[in-house]
Amino acid sequence: MTLPASVQGGPKNFSVRQFGMGFAHGKIILLGEHAVVYGAPALALPVPGLTVTAKAVLSSRPSGHPGDATFTMAGIVPAPAPVETGETLRRIVVDFKKTTGIKVDTPIDIVIDSGIPAGRGLGSSAACARSVVLALADLFGRQLNPGTIFDLVQAAENLTHGRASGIDTLATGSSTPVLLTGGVTREPEVEIDGIFVIGDSGEVGRTNEAVGMLRRRFQRDPQAQEEFLARVSTLTSLAVRDLADGQAGNFGARMIACHAALREAGLSTDRIDTLVGVALTAGSLGAKISGGGLGGCVIALADRPERAQEISSRLLGAGAERTWTVPVGRFARHGHS
Ligand code: MEV
C-alpha cells in the first residue's frame, strides 16, 4: 500500500498493513467478584461464544495528534454507551504508541464489532480494549507479549472501573478458566461436568459504581470489609477445591452462599434476586449474580443439557432478555457422552 505522508520517512521500527484485526471474548465470574479487587481469590470462566472483533486502519484524514483515532461501534452497541468509552479507547492508542515506540501521527479508524452487551458483567469493556490493542499490534505488524497486552488492557480497565483487579483483563483473553489471587494467576483444575447458564436481566449495572459504592462502605465500616473478604475468600477457596474434586453439588452451594454475601453487600437487585430464585426452582445446583453487580447477569449451574435448557426457558419466561450457555467438563469436550 502507499503510506500516508505522515508515516513515510518515519523511523522504520514497524511495517503498516492494510488493516489490523483483533479478537477477544466475554467472561463470567464464577465466584469472588469484588473481593478480588482487595486481593482475595476469584474464579472466572471465558465465554467464547460472546466475541468482540476490532478492525483498525490508517485513516485518509489529515494527520493529527498521537491519540487521534475514531471508534465506530457495530454489533450489539453498548446500551447506553458510557460517556468515557471513547476517551478510554483513545488512551489505548496513545499508550500503545508509547509502549511500542511507534511514531505515527496519521489518525487511526477503528471499528469494534461487539457481541457482548455492555453493563452486564460479561467483560465487555476489557474485551473491547483487548481487541483494540490486538488490532493495533496487527496493523503495525507487532507481536506483543502477554505481559504487554495485559498492561495496555489493564490501564484501560483501571480508567473504566476506577480500580480493576485484572481478572476481566485476563479472562477475556484466556481459553481456560482463570483463578486470580493477590495479582497472581493460575489455571484451576476443572473436573466437574455441567453447564453454566447465563441469564441477562436486562438491567444495566455499572462496575465502577459498584466498586466505588463498596469502597466507600468499607471505608466507613472496616469490619464489614474484613467480614466480607473472609466470607467470600473462604467460599472461593472451597469452590476451587470442589472444581478439582468434581463436586458439582458443593460448587453450586458455594455459588448460592456467594450470592447471599453479594446481596447483603448491596450489590444485587430485586430482579436479579428473582431470577436467581427462578433458576434454583428450575433445578440449578447453584445460582448467583455475576460480575460487577447492581444489575447485569445471573449465572446458574445445571448438571446436564436438558436441565440447562429448562433453566434457560424458565429464566426467559421470568423476564430475562436472553440466555447463553457455557459447558464445562465432559460437556465441553467435542461429542460428549
Ligand atoms: C468485574 O467483572 C469484577 C469485579 O471484581 C471488578 C474487578 O475485579 O476488577 C467487580
Image (spheres, rainbow, N blue to C red):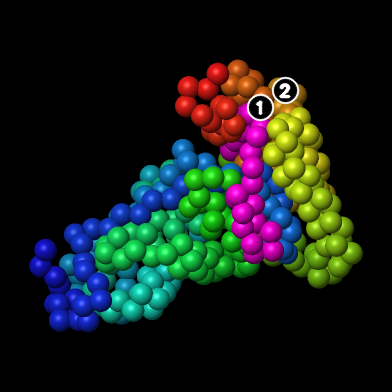
Can residue 23 be seen from the camera position used here?
A: yes
Residue 242 is inside the magenta segment: no
Q: Which label sits on residue 302?
A: 1
Q: Which label sits on residue 70?
A: none
Instruction: Residue at 47%, 27% (x, y): give it.
Output: 334
Upstream in sequence: badge 1 or badge 2: 2
Q: Secondary structure at mark 1?
A: strand
Instruction: Residue at 33%, 79% (x, y): give it.
Output: 101
For disc 2, the marked residue is 283
Question: Between marks 1 and 2, how big is the CA–CA gap?
Answer: 7 Å
Q: Is residue 167 above or below residue 142?
A: above
In x, y percent, where is residue 43? 66, 48
Q: From the viewer's perspective, is 119 left or right of 302? A: left
Amino acid on which disc 2 is placed: Gly
Q: Dot 2, crowdedness within 10 Å: few (<14), some or many (≥20)? A: some
Residue 199 is inside the magenta segment: yes
